[in-house]
Image (tube, rainbow, N blue to C red):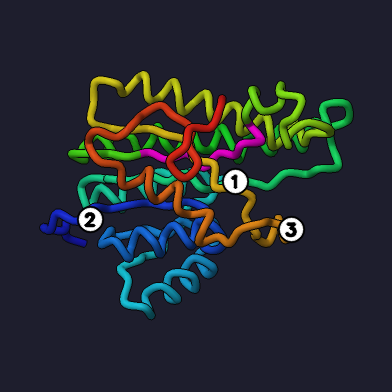
Amino acid sequence: MSRRSDDRRVALVTGANRGIGLAVCRQLAERGVVVLLGARDAAAGDAAARTLQADGLEVRPIVIDTDHRETFDAAREAIEREFGKLDILVNNIGIGCDWAYTAANVPMPLLRNTFEINFFSVVELTQRLLPLVRKSPAGRIVNQSSAIGSLAGHATPESWAMGDRPLAYSASKTALNAFTVHLACALRDTPIKVNAAHPGIVKTDPNPNGLITPEEGARTSVALALLPDDGPTGGFFHLGEAVPW
């Protein structure tokens, strides 16, 4: 497969065959970005990509499976071969929270598995793809976080996050926020911008009681993915407003 000669931005969105990730793919593609739709299951990714292709959008499926880290290298090699760079990485992949378990009773397998998917896999994939992001004239990395990972929110008595908190999910997002800050610092002398996004309380399959649609929830990540050169880095945002760490 030959490398493309045009200058359009290329984005990889992980965990994107449904929900917020799929909405991010659509909104980026509608803005002229060539989108690689990451999914752990090839058939699910193909089906999701076809729904967007039917609307004339340039979206292609790519396998990103946290249970098979070799897919990370395969994706890197495919992107390098065809595009030679990666302009946007949206780390949307993640496992949902289980409100049945707090810090007092969370099973260790659940805690470890949640961190494996929500934190360790994100760090590893980002590191493997970073050489391609460095080749972009204006690389953007967006980590899909959550306000429930805000320590300041948990420490505020009137916060909605007070009460019995799902430690596994919350702590994994707190760790992801830390990665965001540290990576932004490590890349401070480059054009790359690294930020965390809180999508809002989105109605998805894992959260049927959500308050907003995936399309609404995607807006923060899309805005951060398309930041101008003078945009922020190392921040945590929801619809342009800073979220406390």
Q: Of the residues under marks 1 and 2, which one precedes in the sequence?
A: 2
The residue that label 3 is drawn on is 209
Residue drawn at x 74%, y 58% as measured from the top left: 209
Circle nearer the viewer, 2 or 3: 3
Mark 1 Cα shell of 10 Å, populated few (<14), some (14-19), many (≥20): many
Q: Is residue 146 magenta?
A: yes
Q: Of the residues under marks 3 and 1, which one precedes in the sequence?
A: 1
> Where is residue 4 drawn, in percent x and y?
16, 58
> Where is residue 225 drawn, in percent x and y?
35, 45
- The residue most toward the front is 158
Report the Cα–Cα distance between label 2 and label 3.
41 Å
Circles 2 and 3, Cβ within 8 Å, touching? The answer is no
- The answer, for residue 67, to whether it is visible in the render is no
- Image quadrant for the N terminus? bottom left
Tell me, for residue 94, which label it has, or none.
1
Q: Which residues are magenta?
A: 141-149
* Vertical side of 48 occupied by 112: above or below: above
Q: Of the residues shown, which amino acid type is indicated by label 3?
A: Asn
Tell me, for residue 82, which label it has, or none.
2
> Where is residue 180 drawn, in percent x and y?
46, 28
